[in-house]
Image: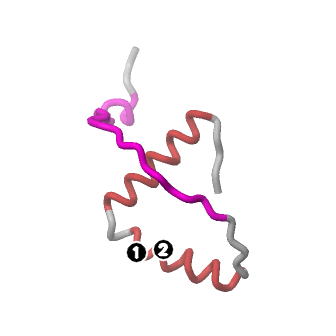
Amino acid sequence: MKKTHKEETLGTIKVLAERPVQYVEMDLDVDENIFNKIAKAGLIEIKHDKRALFNYAITKALEELSGRKSN
């Protein structure tokens, strides 16, 4: 089977460890104006944070693979 360009350049992801974490999920009521401002600020900031970008991307990929969708 011939590999596509994507398959040829994709590296390996190895789980080195896992840590239990405590977190809180919150439901917020936010008006659209502040929601848009915070989302825009977050987009600007995340571009400079490779770890946050990776965490976001891997979380989205795992959600997609598991069939669970988030906003």
Res 17 → quadrant: top left
29 inside magenta stretch: no
Q: Residue 66: x, y in percent?
A: 59, 34
Is disc 2 in contact with disc 1, using a CB cutoff of under 8 Å?
Answer: yes
Establish if 4 lies above or below 35: above
Q: Is residue 17 left or right of residue 54?
A: left
Q: Is residue 54 left or right of residue 60?
A: left
Rendered-image quadrant of the N terminus: top left
Q: Is residue 10 left or right of residue 34?
A: left
**Disc count in the image?**
2
Residue labelled with disc 2? 42
Q: Residue 64: x, y in percent?
A: 58, 40
Q: Residue 18: x, y in percent?
A: 35, 39
Establish if 22 lies above or below 16: below
Q: Is residue 9 visible?
A: no
Q: Nearer the viewer, residue 26 or 16?
A: 26
Rendered-image quadrant of the C terminus: bottom right
